[in-house]
Image: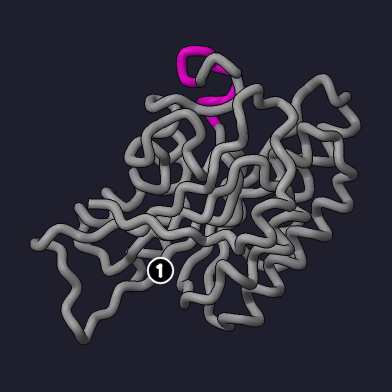
Amino acid sequence: MIITRLLVPPLLFGLVSVWVACKEPEQSQQNVKSKRQSKNEITPDEPARNILFFGNSLTAGYGVEPEDAFPYIIQKQLDSLVLPYQVINAGLSGETTAGGVGRIEWVLREPVAIMILELGGNDGLRGIDPGESMKNLQEIIELAQTKYSDIHIIIAGMEAPPNMGQEYVTAFRSIFRELSQVNDLSLIPFLLEGVGGEPELNLPDGIHPNERGHKIVAENVWAVLKNLVTEG
């Protein structure tokens, strides 16, 4: 059973711009905090630790059922290993890095052990200055670390579309690696590795993964996340 909760303040929700590449109405954030099956229940002296997926429509699972989105797939992987973590899906369709700055403190009201920061894709589609995107992502990182000094942050790298020109594409790609190096954070080099540009793994819009695509995205995330949740 999935418990859903709204993680977007009403005043901020109306300020989030629609992803220009999407023809459908903006999809509301799908927030998922799954309930473990009885065999995996956490004992009172072992409270669940939250893993926050903070991102845009990719995280929200645009165009697929909530249980087919990669954060939910990660939750099932955690449950299968009986690991004391619960996923919170704070994905919002159309979210930019600037929108993330305005939303992060509200989302961090609950304790977070690990945050997967998946923002920037919409900035790249809109041709926003990579320096501005990097500044916004750095602010999100600092706000999260100020709130929870022991938080582990994983940055999900993204790519700008080729039609933005090679100079822009190169500059955009570099911001994620640079942020991970400057802040000593884990990095998923490219969240959509193996999925981006593959028609059979995406919805008709060519941007959002379908069910098969989300399974591969989950593998990309797990390859990095597993080192944090299984250590010790």
The residue that label 1 is drawn on is 50
How dense is the environment of label 1, judged by Cα within 10 Å: few (below 14), some, or many (20 and up)?
some
Q: Is residue 197 magenta?
A: yes
x 40%, y 68%: residue = 50
Front in this rendered view, residue 128 or 189: 128
x 50%, y 27%: residue = 209
x 61%, y 31%: residue = 25
Residue 91: where, in percent of width, then height? 54, 49
* Above or below 29: residue 68: above
Residue 73: where, in percent of width, then height? 34, 44
Q: How is the image coloured?
A: one colour
Q: Is residue 31 magenta?
A: no
**Which of the 4 image quadrants contains residue 182?**
bottom right
**Which of the 4 image quadrants contains residue 81?**
bottom left
Residue 72: where, in percent of width, then height? 35, 47
* Above or below 8: residue 188: above
Element type where label 1 sits in the image: strand
Extreme residue in the bottom direction: 45
Residue 19: where, in percent of width, then height? 70, 35
Under mark 1, the amino acid is: Asn
Which portion, as a residue range, is magenta?
Answer: 193-202
The reply, left or right, for residue 84 in relation to residue 29 is left
Majority SS type along the magenta span: loop
The reply, left or right, for residue 177 in relation to residue 111 is right
Front in this rendered view, residue 48 or 218: 48
Front in this rendered view, residue 210 or 219: 210
x 74%, y 43%: residue = 17
